[in-house]
Amino acid sequence: MNEFPQTERSTLKRLPKRGVYDRELVYQILDEGFVCHVSFVWDGQPFVIPTGYARAGDQLYIHGSQLSRMLRTLAQGIEVCIAVTLVDGLVLARSAFHHSLNYRSAVIFGRAAIVAERAPKLAALLAFSEQVLPGRWHDVREPTEAELKATTVLAVPLDEVSAKVRSGPPIDDEADYAMDVWAGVLPLKLAAGEPVSDPRLPETIPPPAYTASYRREKS
Amino acid sequence: MNEFPQTERSTLKRLPKRGVYDRELVYQILDEGFVCHVSFVWDGQPFVIPTGYARAGDQLYIHGSQLSRMLRTLAQGIEVCIAVTLVDGLVLARSAFHHSLNYRSAVIFGRAAIVAERAPKLAALLAFSEQVLPGRWHDVREPTEAELKATTVLAVPLDEVSAKVRSGPPIDDEADYAMDVWAGVLPLKLAAGEPVSDPRLPETIPPPAYTASYRREKS
């Protein structure tokens, strides 16, 4: 199936032409990001908490300490709504009113379940590492049994997802195009700086190649 | 008052030493960002939606079309939870388990109210423009009365806010410091590329200086 079903809660009401339900396009957004915002209801109160995630197959994984209040709450199987947002640029129009942002965002609805068994749990932890920095996992010490036990991994099935995309130049009122003011897009992206070695690292160990070529966007 | 009061819902339970309740530090986070994630409950279901914001004084403003479902829902005065997250770097430890992110995030609890009167509404729209790109407002056409009417502005008082910050190098298990693997931080920030002129812009209009020197972090 290449299209997510459009449900009442996942269907864009405003600007429906910005809506994206294609699974491949949604997964491109999820694969370029690595921080999501997890929303849930507790005692009638909305909460939203940022956290890392990994997308592997048709699952979104989040993880953390087994002591995490959020994870313990979500593990009860309550409804969750998760957003992933990529900011692509400032859209600078000739009028204040038509200023906008270029962005790609995905919103996931569902319920989380604990990944309890050792093999899929370890696979999810590998997926987190690969989501953030491909190749890193193979350079570092793998989790011990105690570390695995101290970590909770939750999976949310990617069954009900929509994305929203704005791209391209500003759209101004026709009369404003005659104005003598610059208009266009200022592109933005999450970019890496120079790696900073741990103060306790021997000077003989150089930063690995994957820190020098780091970029979130896929070619 | 320089410290936000710590309420049950705003107090960090896990890793309380990462908690920040200082108003000045929280406002530094809010002023460096410009996209937030707004969470609310509708019909028992959690929703989270990304949107732009402005911080001015002790208020956080969000805005959009008067037709926006989210804004119309929030305008009813229901509880809202809003997160602003800045990703500062990948923390690359010697063990998979101790990998982390450097980040600064703020979470706001409260209720939104419509900014209805013309003067404060226009001031809020100016604040949005200044939050994203200082100086831009004075170059462009100001909103007409019809545009003002078509725009809904909501204010959330900054009364109940907490922030969470992780910074600095990885913290590894003592035995792992002997490993022959690079460890440290790969800094990340939202960075601007070259401005892209609107296809309909006359070639004689160059990009303004504020597009060439754009950076989110304050000096």
Image: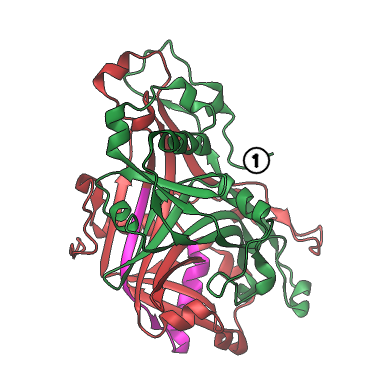
Chain colours: A red, B green
Residue farthest toward the front in the current orientation of the protein: B117
Quadrant showing the C terminus of chain B: top right
Q: Secondary structure at mark 1?
A: loop
Q: Residue B93 appears in which quarter of the rendering?
A: bottom right
Measuring 31% from the left and 55% from the top, which residue is drawn there?
A: B70
Say whether residue A121 is magenta: yes
**Residue B168 location (% of width, % of height):** 72, 60
Q: How many marks?
A: 1
Residue A122 visible to an observer of this rendering: no
Q: Is residue B155 left or right of residue A178?
A: right
Residue closest to the eye, B192 or A37: A37
Residue B108 visible to an observer of this rendering: yes
Say whether residue A108 is magenta: yes
Residue closest to the eye, A60 or A102: A102
Measuring 50% from the left and 75% from the top, which residue is drawn there?
A: A63
**Residue B9 location (% of width, % of height):** 52, 73
From this view, report whether residue A201 is shown above or below residue A89. below
Q: Is residue A173 left or right of residue A55?
A: left
From this view, report whether residue A204 is shown above or below residue A17. below
- Residue segment shown in magenta: A104-131
Residue closest to the eye, A8 or B121: B121
| Badge 1: chain ID | B
**Residue B144 location (% of width, % of height):** 32, 26
Q: Is residue B126 left or right of residue B165?
A: left
Quadrant showing the N terminus of chain B: bottom right
**Residue A184 location (% of width, % of height):** 40, 27
Report the residue marked by disc 1.
B218
Residue closest to the eye, B112 or A85: B112
Q: Residue B158 appears in which quarter of the rendering?
A: bottom right
Categorize mark 1 by other alpha carbons within 10 Å: few (<14), some (14-19), many (20+).
few
Amino acid under disc 1: Lys
Measuring 65% from the left and 67% from the top, which residue is drawn there?
A: B19
